[in-house]
Image (tube, helix red, strand yellow):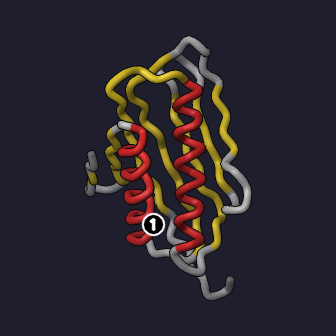
């Protein structure tokens, strides 16, 4: 691991569905995204996951958060929103700490995994890079 570098990555993900979705569906989407991103990281090179995490503050109060620390274990997710809450759109803050890939490679992986998942789920995804003048919008 001595030769692996760390280039932290942070972004805002805006997921949008045509109709409102239950919190259970949002939690499943987040778990799928983190699991697929973790898998993509370790199969794309000699990379080591430090921590991949995401959080969305829910408009009705509470939060949805997820964490991934190893490709071998499923993502850990938690939701503190109220069950009847339904949302068509959520903004999530994503932080990726993976040893090995460049920032550009991490962005490519996040984009590819996110866009493929959004397409399979019938959703749209836009990605905005945190603390940057660069905004990437994908639909």
Residue 27, above or below 100: above
Q: Residues within 10 Å of mark 1 (few under 14, many from 20)?
A: many
Q: Position of residue 30 (x, y in %)?
A: 55, 41
Residue drawn at 55 percent across, 18 percent down: 61
Residue 49, above or below 65: below
Residue drawn at 52 percent across, 32 percent down: 26
Q: Nearer the viewer, residue 112 or 9?
A: 112
The residue indicated by pointer 1 is 106
- The quarter of the picture where the C terminus appears is top left
Residue drawn at 52 percent across, 48 percent down: 33
Element type at mark 1:
helix
Q: Position of residue 123 (x, y in %)?
A: 36, 37
Q: Nearer the viewer, residue 20 or 57?
A: 20
Q: Position of residue 119 (x, y in %)?
A: 36, 45
Q: How many marks?
A: 1
Residue drawn at 54 percent across, 79 percent down: 45
Residue 95, above or below 92: below
Q: Is residue 95 left or right of residue 111?
A: right
Q: Is residue 51 left or right of residue 56?
A: right
Residue 68, above or below 7: above
In this view of the protein, can residue 130 be seen by the observer? no
From this viewpoint, which residue is outermost toward the bottom? 3
From this viewpoint, which residue is outermost toward the right? 73
Q: Nearer the viewer, residue 73 or 105?
A: 73
| Picture quadrant where residue 51 is located | bottom right
Q: Position of residue 20 (x, y in %)?
A: 41, 20
């Amino acid at each position: 691991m001595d030769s692996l570098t760390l280039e932290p990555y942070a972004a805002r993900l805006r997921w949008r569905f045509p109709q409102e979705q239950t919190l259970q569906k949002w939690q499943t989407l987040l778990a799928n995204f983190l699991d697929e991103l973790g898998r993509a990281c370790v199969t794309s090179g000699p990379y080591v996951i430090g921590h991949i995490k995401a959080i969305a503050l829910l408009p009705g109060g509470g939060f949805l958060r997820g964490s991934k620390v190893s490709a071998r274990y499923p993502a850990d997710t938690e939701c503190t929103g109220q069950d009847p809450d339904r949302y068509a759109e959520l903004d999530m803050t994503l932080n990726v700490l993976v040893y090995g890939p460049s920032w550009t490679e991490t962005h490519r992986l996040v984009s590819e995994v996110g866009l493929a998942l959004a397409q399979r789920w019938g959703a749209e995804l836009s990605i905005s890079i945190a603390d940057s003048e660069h905004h990437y919008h994908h639909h």
